[in-house]
Amino acid sequence: MAKKRFRLATVLRARQAKEDAVRGELLAARAALREAELMAERTGETLRGRHLPSSAVVRSYMAAISARQALAGELFAAQRVVADAEQAVAEKLREYTDASQARRAVEKLEERYKAERAAAELAEDQMLVDELATTRRSRTKPPMDNTENSAEGDEAP
């Protein structure tokens, strides 16, 4: 019997490739999130390190306030980038989960197909063994009818 191949093998390969691609995108999104978090942390540390001058010179005081406001704006923007990156990671994680479930569904079909093929091959092998046993018995022993006839024939005369 010719071995039939699993018809959905190409679908399985395509789903595996999609899952791998989404996994790569997820890893890239996580790396971008880490980078955004580091940038926000550095900006926050810089802002915390900037103090207002103790001198009463108006120009230096105004410059320090302007610099702190600019850093606060940068920190806000960095925090917004972090929030966007977290959202992107969550979306990629959902896509990865969906791709993984789709691949697993086809894998289950493949496993079921292989189990059915193995059962069919086992049944075919058993049928061949039974046929061999039947033909061997008919070759080695005379049929039951002949034994009964010969026993009857010995008693008749």
Image (cartoon, rainbow, N blue to C red):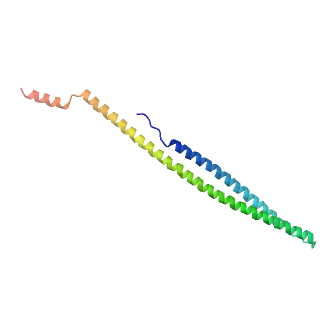
**Residue at the extreme left of the image, as rendered:** 157
For the C terminus, the quadrant is top left
Q: Residue at x 62, y 48 (%)?
A: 21
Residue 72 or 151: which is nearer the viewer?
Answer: 72
Q: Would residue 44 be seen by someone viewing this image from the given angle?
A: no
Q: Quadrant of residue 127?
A: top left
Q: Quadrant of residue 37?
A: bottom right
x, y percentage for residue 132? 31, 31
Residue 140 or 23: which is nearer the viewer?
Answer: 23
**Residue at the extreme bottom of the image, as rendered:** 56
Q: Residue at x 69, y 53 (%)?
A: 31
Question: Where 53 sits versus 150, above or below?
Answer: below
x, y percentage for residue 120? 39, 40
Q: Residue at x 92, y 72 (%)?
A: 58
In the rendered structure, the answer to whether residue 14 lies left or right of residue 85 reads left
In the rendered structure, the answer to whether residue 139 lies left or right of residue 28 reads left
Number of marks in picture: 0
